[in-house]
Amino acid sequence: MRIEILCTGDEILTGKTVNTNYSHMAQRLEDVGLSVTWGTTVGDDRNSLVTAFRQASERADSVIVNGGLGPTVDDLSQEVAGQAAGVELVLNEGWLARMQEYYSRRNRVMPEVNRKQAMLPKGAEVIDNPIGTACGFAVDIGSARFYFTPGVPRELRKMLEEQIVPRLLKASGLQGVTRMKRFHSFGIGESRADELIRDVESLAPSGGVKLGFQSHYPQLETKLVARGDDMDELEREIAPVADEIRRRYGNFIVAEDNESIEDVILSRIREQAGSLAIAEMFTSGNIAARIAPLEGAETLFRRGVVARDLGNLMNSVGLDAPEIADGVSVETASAVAGALQTESGASHALAVLVDLDEGEDKMEFGGNVCIGIAGENGTAVRQARLLGGRQWVRLGAGEMGLDCLRRYLLGLPVDERVDFEKH
Amino acid sequence: MRIEILCTGDEILTGKTVNTNYSHMAQRLEDVGLSVTWGTTVGDDRNSLVTAFRQASERADSVIVNGGLGPTVDDLSQEVAGQAAGVELVLNEGWLARMQEYYSRRNRVMPEVNRKQAMLPKGAEVIDNPIGTACGFAVDIGSARFYFTPGVPRELRKMLEEQIVPRLLKASGLQGVTRMKRFHSFGIGESRADELIRDVESLAPSGGVKLGFQSHYPQLETKLVARGDDMDELEREIAPVADEIRRRYGNFIVAEDNESIEDVILSRIREQAGSLAIAEMFTSGNIAARIAPLEGAETLFRRGVVARDLGNLMNSVGLDAPEIADGVSVETASAVAGALQTESGASHALAVLVDLDEGEDKMEFGGNVCIGIAGENGTAVRQARLLGGRQWVRLGAGEMGLDCLRRYLLGLPVDERVDFEKH
């Protein structure tokens, strides 16, 4: 089945807003085994919309239109949909009542302009939007089915998930349910991951598992997707593949599915009735900022310390800087972590020290990273050289610091070599 | 002139990569007074590319094609361009020599596959790419001029700026040069900014200044664009408009043009031969992370301290927590800033304390922000209530902290009410 996505609105067309609705929709369709074949972006312009609807209807079987369902005069989707489908707009009393209720629950009267949001092409199928006033709908234009969705990301995502994807799966003849399994790893580059596990799909009993990667440096996401008649069957299909990926990736998997490395760290510390403190140099608070603001972290995160200068950092945890005068080293990292643990009273302390290169910020620019962890099972250290420019070094050092802490908390070796480090 | 953007590549089509190349191109064209009328996204698929080229050539005068100029077999742009233009591909000896030189400068031999990158449609105009091996080119397809650009963002941006924009301006009959003036502000929402300055365009002597906004919460960017025959004339055109914007926005302008609020703060501290320390609660290191990693900050940024608990934060700057037991307040913020200034030896200390609401993370969720600054001109404090959910509060509190510091350093009042705060 040929599926297209048609995004409307001047904000998107002019680039004022980066089109993350598009990438979200396309990814979600890929996740369930559907594919987008074409993307179109047009502004709030009647002629462009008419042409875009017509051309999409000639190329595709299904078209998801995003945006243009709002109450203002530049929201043209219903009107142009009616025109393209050759039908008039009629008031949907059910949706009008829903909107009036929506407003009255908020102790407000529905503004008259919102009435426009209940005007749908005659014969359109209503697609529910339980969290907003923009009414989704589906209508045939030419031989293609058009699905109209709101531009507000939260509303779009919910409607896509609960309403559009099931309809598209049905229309595409892909019956049944979809199961996705995700692995988040740190330390394996996409090309090596591909070499490492490209043959695992064949381990699925019925061969119905599709493998995919998505790189978000420094993490890599590995996805398995299967579709079938029931979830138990899919579990059996995916399980041997997932097990083999776990075996091959080993300790490099930092989290699975909706968990993050931060979640894993926090829940492990919580289980141990522990607490955490973090000392940083060039990462400059980025590591603390990934942990401290999370819900539940307020009671576990004791202290973060940032200094660009090693002497300042040491002073700030009560160390006499000249005592250890050999600069950034695993010994210093260990000393800083130990002192921070004592000073803060936290059960665990992480120190991520970076000795940055001097000179121009280019691909060859790098830094030496020294990581120290002090915890209830003694001290652990890790050293690595990272390259790729200032931003890359900062991201890599932060991730490596958190990953070492995760490994320490889980009793895994902290010093397994990662693909991003250089000798 | 009707301009279209056509993005190619499976990574973009499937949403694996968010299409920031599109938004960058569209924004830059808007900046110089050109408009994009249509955007298309297709994958590395011959049939889709042929159709997309043909349809774009029927709608547009100029088309920018992005991606597909690489050396691998799935890079199809030259080939399909030749097919659509009805000409064969011929080897461009000049570009081949450029690539060989590019590799030899890096002490490498050009791989044979790269030869493909020098195969251009016969009669194509070469468009220089001084920083990569993908050769840009322009060719007519139907009655439209197609400009082919590389997918690598750095290469695209340079080519767009130096090669494509001038050609498009010329083709559109928009002669001369473009001058853009940008203001970055904090505290004025887009709708109020629009009310406040919507009439300022009329102050341009020849009426040739165009006003635009781009919101990046919590900052707002206000742009003035003028085009004409020479820069001096444009300066005279823009100056009265810019002056009036400065007058109306007043102290809410945090930086102009390519400067950022962080730059303004760092350069002011550098001028005063000063240094900086920052204490944070719920912003969790985000404020330090905006300042400390910048080039030049290594000698000015002394220390950052993060704690989610006020008592912990106070202890970490040497204060006895029970001494000031009234929780988050301007008095506490002032005390923390003062103690941090003393402890760190920095000339200036910023403390941003947040007393976060309890309960569900929704629009009505907020926090009370108390900011304290200790510096060579004594202490300053600021209090505000921010709403909009956890993420919004964190962003707003961080920005307000930096803005208070900027104001303090420039001798401006730190407590002017901003649009985002509630009573």
Image: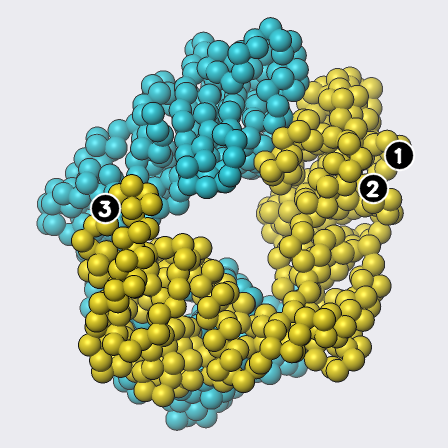
Chain colours: A cyan, B yellow
Mark 1: few, some, or many residues within 10 Å (few <14, many ≥20)? few
What residue appears at the point 84 percent right and 38 percent down from the top-left corner? B381
The residue identified by callout 2 is B408
Where disc 2 sits, the SS reads helix
**Is residue A58 found left or right of A395 in the rendered image?**
left
What residue appears at the point 63 percent right and 64 percent down from the top-left corner? B214
The residue identified by callout 1 is B377
The kind of residue on which mark 1 rests is Asn
Residue B255 in percent (x, y) is at 72, 53
Where disc 3 sits, the SS reads loop
**Is residue B176 found left or right of B142 in the rendered image?**
right
Mark 3: few, some, or many residues within 10 Å (few <14, many ≥20)? few
Whether tag 3 and tag 1 are in contact, CB under 8 A, the answer is no
Whether tag 1 and tag 2 are in contact, CB under 8 A, the answer is yes
Residue B405 in percent (x, y) is at 77, 41
Position of residue B224 relative to residue A374, above or below, is below
Position of residue A358 relative to residue A410, above or below, is below
A151 vs B148, nearest the viewer: B148
- Separation (CA) of disc 3 from disc 1: 62 Å
Name the subunit of mark 3.
Answer: B
Which mark, by number, is residue B109?
3
Q: Residue furthest right?
A: B378
Q: Decide if residue A155 is in sight here.
A: no
Q: Which of marks 2 and 3 is nearer the N terminus?
A: 3
What residue appears at the point 76 percent right and 26 percent down from the top-left corner? B346
What residue appears at the point 32 percent right and 43 percent down from the top-left corner? B106
Q: Decide if residue B373 is in sight here.
A: yes
Position of residue B53 relative to residue A405, above or below, is below
